[in-house]
Image: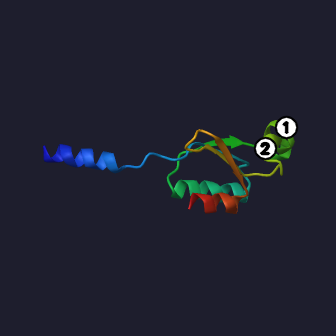
Amino acid sequence: EVEEKIVQAATATQPTPKFTNFKLYGFWRSSCTWRVRIALAAKEIPYEIVPIYLFSKEQMIDDYTAKNHMQQVPTLEFNDENDTIVRITQSLAIIEFLD
């Protein structure tokens, strides 16, 4: 009975995630993309990697340009608490947001 109350208290205090469905658009050889991947791993945030092949100029394709007008990697995309899609570009800005 005591154990049951402890488990209930522990689960009741866990916060609901404010942000969900993280996607990281990046190129595997990009040091900026690696910086963000390291930060996501350190924060234990699950995410999907969406490869953008820079040598094939995929960053210039309209689909990606709509996500990042600067046509650079990385871009972090996620849903906020209102289920609105949010995108952050530039690795340092992404890392600061994650902190």
Q: Position of residue 25 (x, y in %)?
A: 70, 45
Taking the view exactly as shown, the residue that stands out farthest to the left is 1
* Residue type, mark 2 in image: Tyr
Residue 84 x %, y %: 63, 40
Residue 82's label in the rendered image is none
| Secondary structure category for the residue under label 2 | loop
10 Å crowding of disc 2: few (<14), some (14-19), many (20+)? some
Q: Which residue is drawn at 83% across and 51% down?
A: 70
Which of the 4 image quadrants contains residue 65? top right
Q: Which mark is residue 53?
A: 2
Q: Which amino acid does label 1 sit on?
A: Asp
Q: How far apart are marks 1 and 2 (CA)?
A: 14 Å
Residue 92 is drawn in which quadrant? bottom right
Q: 67 or 25: nearer the eye?
A: 67
Q: Name the residue under label 1.
A: 62
Tally the marks.
Answer: 2
Mark 1 vs mark 2: which is more N-terminal?
A: 2
Residue at 64%, 56% in the rendered image: 36
Alpha-carbon neighbours of circle 1 within 10 Å: few (<14), some, or many (≥20)?
few
